[in-house]
Amino acid sequence: MEPHKPLFSLLLSLALTATLASCGELSEEQAHQVDEALGDSLTSTTESWDVDMEIIEEGIKKMHLTGSYAATYTAKDSNTTRIKGPVDIQLYDSTGAVTTRASCNRAVYNADKAIFELFGDVRVNTSDNRHLESEYLRWGQDDNRITTPKFVIIKTPTDSIAGTGFEGTTDLVNYTITKPTGQFLVD
């Protein structure tokens, strides 16, 4: 979309409204057309520096995120926040204890779908000494699962596994690597 198109549409709609209003009352149909034109062209952008964001569900803190800059783009059918880093994320359990920490260069949060996407030098560390590294990671907030089609390295107290394609839980206990390589210790 061209950057000035929404602004042009808004100005055109306002000019049309002013012209029609000066000629007399708008008919119901004309008023509806003006409202539709304004609704299609309205988007908003909010910028924040030194971002400090929390997600709280039913009075319990689920996530804490910090970043250097964020821009939230809100339109009729989407609400997306782009966060520049370094980005740091902490996930909490129901007792308030930190279970997982993640860091990356930048992130995108789609509020409508409750999905975080982490980009660049993604690192995940859990409270029980499990680590994941990748260049991209997608976290579904509703199902608390992380996925990536990219290369990953996972280190646990007993294993070091690398591969391409990953799906698992945020605590890195239950996961699948599509094309694994590495060293395994079998007890």
Image (spheres, rainbow, N blue to C red):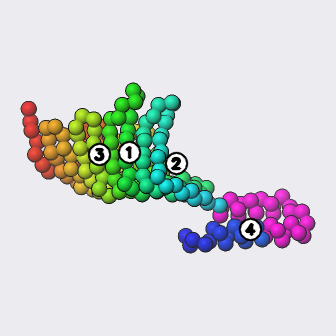
Instruction: Please name the amino acid that badge 2 sits on.
Output: Asp
Mark 3, residue position: 124
Q: Residue 149 lies in what quarter of the image?
A: bottom left
Of 77 and 8, nearer the camera is 8
Quadrant for the C terminus in the image: top left
Q: Could you tell me how many numbered marks the image carries? A: 4
Q: x, y (%) of residue 5? A: 62, 71
Residue 47 belongs to the span the image colors magenta: no
- Give me the C-alpha separation between circle 3 and circle 1: 9 Å
The residue lying toward the viewer, choosing from 7 and 164, is: 7
Q: Secondary structure at mark 3?
A: strand
Q: Which residue is mark 1?
A: 89
| Image quadrant where residue 90 sits | top left
Instruction: Please name the residue that numbered disc 4 is placed on.
Output: 13
- Whichever of callouts 4 and 2 sits on the residue coming sooner in the sequence is 4
In contact (CB < 8 Å): disc 4 and disc 2? no
Distance of label 4 from label 3 (alpha carbons): 49 Å
Circle on res. 7? none
The amino acid pointed to by label 4 is Ser
Helix or strand or loop: what does disc 1 sit on? strand
Residue identifier under label 2: 112
Tag 3: Cα neighbours inside 10 Å, few (<14), some, or many (≥20)? Answer: many
Q: Is residue 169 left or right of residue 38?
A: left
User: Which kind of residue does numbered mark 3 sit on?
Assistant: Val
